[in-house]
Amino acid sequence: MAEEDVNQVTPGARVEEKLYNVRFKTDEDRSHLIVLDNQLCNRCVDKPCTVFCPVTVYKWENGEHKISVSYEKCVECGACRIGCPYFNIEWKYPKGGFGVQYKFG
Ligand code: SF4
Ligand code: SF4
Protein backbone atom coordinates (compact mmCIF):
# COMPACT_ATOMS: atom_id res chain seq x y z
CA MET A 1 0.00 0.00 0.00
CA ALA A 2 1.34 3.45 -0.92
CA GLU A 3 2.32 5.77 1.95
CA GLU A 4 -0.39 8.31 1.14
CA ASP A 5 -3.00 5.55 1.46
CA VAL A 6 -1.64 4.45 4.85
CA ASN A 7 -1.92 7.99 6.19
CA GLN A 8 -5.51 8.64 5.07
CA VAL A 9 -7.76 9.55 7.99
CA THR A 10 -10.98 7.59 7.97
CA PRO A 11 -14.10 9.67 8.71
CA GLY A 12 -15.15 8.91 12.28
CA ALA A 13 -11.68 7.68 13.21
CA ARG A 14 -10.70 7.79 16.88
CA VAL A 15 -8.38 10.56 18.14
CA GLU A 16 -5.54 8.06 18.44
CA GLU A 17 -5.95 7.14 14.77
CA LYS A 18 -6.06 10.77 13.71
CA LEU A 19 -2.93 11.52 15.71
CA TYR A 20 -1.13 8.98 13.55
CA ASN A 21 -0.86 11.78 10.98
CA VAL A 22 0.70 14.20 13.45
CA ARG A 23 4.40 14.67 14.15
CA PHE A 24 5.93 16.59 17.04
CA LYS A 25 9.26 18.30 17.50
CA THR A 26 9.64 19.11 21.16
CA ASP A 27 11.43 22.21 22.39
CA GLU A 28 13.35 20.64 25.27
CA ASP A 29 14.35 24.04 26.68
CA ARG A 30 11.01 25.67 27.20
CA SER A 31 7.34 24.84 27.52
CA HIS A 32 5.02 27.03 25.43
CA LEU A 33 2.29 26.38 28.04
CA ILE A 34 2.69 27.68 31.57
CA VAL A 35 0.28 27.36 34.47
CA LEU A 36 0.77 30.71 36.19
CA ASP A 37 -0.52 30.11 39.72
CA ASN A 38 -0.86 26.67 41.30
CA GLN A 39 -2.77 28.15 44.24
CA LEU A 40 -5.54 29.03 41.81
CA CYS A 41 -5.55 25.45 40.54
CA ASN A 42 -5.93 24.21 44.11
CA ARG A 43 -9.08 26.30 44.44
CA CYS A 44 -10.39 25.44 40.96
CA VAL A 45 -13.04 22.86 41.84
CA ASP A 46 -13.74 21.20 38.49
CA LYS A 47 -10.28 21.60 36.93
CA PRO A 48 -11.76 21.77 33.41
CA CYS A 49 -8.33 21.82 31.76
CA THR A 50 -8.08 18.12 32.61
CA VAL A 51 -11.18 17.53 30.48
CA PHE A 52 -11.25 20.01 27.58
CA CYS A 53 -7.76 19.34 26.27
CA PRO A 54 -8.21 16.76 23.49
CA VAL A 55 -4.85 15.14 24.17
CA THR A 56 -4.81 15.34 28.00
CA VAL A 57 -1.86 17.68 28.34
CA TYR A 58 -3.09 18.79 31.79
CA LYS A 59 -3.22 16.36 34.68
CA TRP A 60 -4.00 17.04 38.32
CA GLU A 61 -1.22 15.66 40.53
CA ASN A 62 -2.95 14.90 43.82
CA GLY A 63 0.20 14.37 45.85
CA GLU A 64 1.87 17.56 44.61
CA HIS A 65 -1.31 19.67 44.54
CA LYS A 66 -0.56 21.02 41.12
CA ILE A 67 -1.32 20.60 37.46
CA SER A 68 1.36 18.86 35.43
CA VAL A 69 1.74 20.00 31.83
CA SER A 70 2.83 17.50 29.18
CA TYR A 71 3.38 20.27 26.64
CA GLU A 72 5.13 17.96 24.20
CA LYS A 73 1.73 16.41 23.33
CA CYS A 74 0.00 19.73 22.56
CA VAL A 75 -1.72 19.86 19.15
CA GLU A 76 -2.10 23.68 19.41
CA CYS A 77 -5.89 23.69 19.23
CA GLY A 78 -5.99 26.81 21.46
CA ALA A 79 -8.80 25.58 23.74
CA CYS A 80 -6.85 26.31 26.92
CA ARG A 81 -6.53 30.00 25.95
CA ILE A 82 -10.21 30.40 26.71
CA GLY A 83 -11.13 27.25 28.63
CA CYS A 84 -9.46 28.01 31.96
CA PRO A 85 -12.03 29.97 33.98
CA TYR A 86 -9.21 31.92 35.70
CA PHE A 87 -7.14 32.57 32.54
CA ASN A 88 -4.38 30.85 34.46
CA ILE A 89 -2.61 29.35 31.47
CA GLU A 90 -0.06 31.33 29.52
CA TRP A 91 -0.18 30.09 25.95
CA LYS A 92 2.28 30.90 23.22
CA TYR A 93 3.06 29.22 19.97
CA PRO A 94 6.17 27.08 20.23
CA LYS A 95 9.36 28.64 18.87
CA GLY A 96 9.79 28.39 15.11
CA GLY A 97 10.38 24.84 13.93
CA PHE A 98 9.06 23.27 17.14
CA GLY A 99 5.67 21.93 18.12
CA VAL A 100 3.14 19.96 16.15
CA GLN A 101 3.42 19.32 12.44
CA TYR A 102 0.37 18.15 10.52
CA LYS A 103 0.51 15.96 7.50
CA PHE A 104 -2.41 16.30 5.12
CA GLY A 105 -3.30 14.07 2.21
S1 SF4 B 1 -8.66 25.13 34.63
FE1 SF4 B 1 -7.09 26.71 35.05
S2 SF4 B 1 -7.21 27.17 37.23
FE2 SF4 B 1 -8.37 25.27 36.87
S3 SF4 B 1 -6.88 23.65 37.31
FE3 SF4 B 1 -6.76 24.08 35.12
S4 SF4 B 1 -5.12 25.63 34.86
FE4 SF4 B 1 -5.71 25.55 37.03
S1 SF4 C 1 -3.72 24.16 22.97
FE1 SF4 C 1 -5.25 22.48 22.89
S2 SF4 C 1 -3.98 20.63 22.76
FE2 SF4 C 1 -2.64 22.27 23.47
S3 SF4 C 1 -2.69 22.12 25.69
FE3 SF4 C 1 -4.25 23.64 25.08
S4 SF4 C 1 -6.14 22.45 24.93
FE4 SF4 C 1 -4.46 20.96 24.93
Image (cartoon, grey):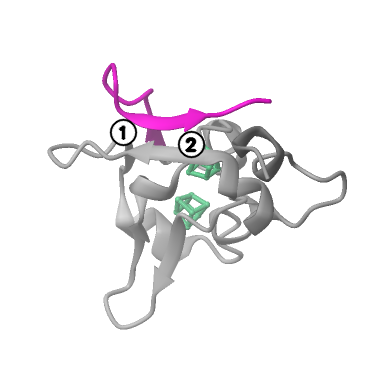
Q: Was residue 103 drawn as part of the magenta stretch in this picture?
A: yes
Of residues 60 and 30, the one nearer the viewer is 30
| Left or right side of 41 for 49 | right
Work out whether 1 lies above or below 81: below
Neighbor class of circle 2 (other Cα within 10 Å; few <14, some 14-19, many 20+) is few
Magenta segment, which residues?
Answer: 89-105
**Residue type pointed to by label 2:** Phe
**Residue type pointed to by label 1:** His
Residue shown at 62%/51% (left/top)?
Answer: 54
Q: Give yes or no for contact between labels 2 and 1 (Cβ–Cβ under 8 Å).
A: no
Tag 1's secondary structure?
loop
Label 2 C-beta lies within 8 Å of the nearest ligand 1 atom:
yes
Measure the C-alpha gap from mark 2 to mark 1.
15 Å
Work out whether 55 lies above or below 102: below
Q: State the mark number for residue 32.
A: 1
Q: Choose the circle earlier in sequence order: 2 or 1.
A: 1
Is residue 85 something one can see in this rendering?
no
| Left or right side of 104 for 11 | right
Quarter of the figure that contains the C terminus: top right
Percent across and percent down for residue 39 are: 33, 58
Of residues 104 and 72, the one nearer the viewer is 104
Work out whether 63 lies above or below 37: below
Is residue 55 something one can see in this rendering?
yes
Q: What is the quadrant of residue 77 in the picture?
A: top right
Q: State the mark number for residue 81.
A: none
Residue under numbered circle 2: 87
Q: Residue furthest left?
A: 29
